[in-house]
Amino acid sequence: MDPSYPAGGAGGPAVEDGLPTVTEYRALRAAVGWPSPDDDVCRAALDGSVHGVLARGESGPVGMARLVGDGAMYLLIVDVVVHPDHRGAGLGRRMVERLVQVAGARRVQLVAAAEVVPFYQRLGFTCEPSRLMAYRTLG
């Protein structure tokens, strides 16, 4: 399958398989107000990805999403980011759909903030009764 999924419109960002550089990763996180740990931690996180997708505009990445996990049983979608200047063009949908496609028949999960739950529900995700628990976070 072709690893690039062009936008249906006049030269909009294409969604393609791949991961951002550490600099691009940190810039996209900052664009949506997310903190980032230091470069070494970001590099290790990116290196641990099962798969990644980028929405690439003329000036570089304007969106990203990653699939992490063991690659066999447990897969989690993380870091779904669309730069605020490029929201509403279907990039988030296309990136998530590509990661679900890559996962195939395996179960895919994600953690969503309350305000984006309806977005993921439209893509076929359902809320489960389990609770996310955290022991320690990196910041």
Image: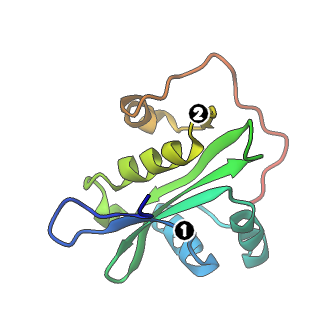
Look at the picture and state if 82 lies above or below 23: above
What type is the residue that disc 1 sits on? Gly
Q: Position of residue 126 (x, y in %)?
A: 50, 23
The residue carrying pointer 1 sits among few (fewer than 14), some (14 to 19) or many (20 or more) residues within 10 Å by Cα, namely: some
Q: Which mark is residue 18?
A: 1
- Look at discs 1 and 2 and give the one toward the viewer: 2
Look at the picture and state if 115 lies above or below 41: above
Q: For this view, does 112 lie left or right of residue 39?
A: left
Q: Position of residue 93 (x, y in %)?
A: 37, 47
Q: Residue at x 43, y 38 (%)?
A: 116
Q: Residue furthest top?
A: 129
Q: Residue furthest left?
A: 10
* Secondary structure of residue under mark 2: loop
Identify the image quadrant of the N terminus. bottom left
Q: Residue at x 73, y 47 (%)?
A: 71
* Secondary structure of residue under mark 1: loop
Q: Position of residue 41 (x, y in %)?
A: 77, 69
Residue at image mark 2: 105
Sooner in the amino-acid sequence: mark 1 or mark 2: 1
Image-quadrant location for residue 12: bottom left
Q: For this view, does 75 lie left or right of residue 7?
A: right
Q: CA distance from mark 1 to mark 2?
A: 21 Å
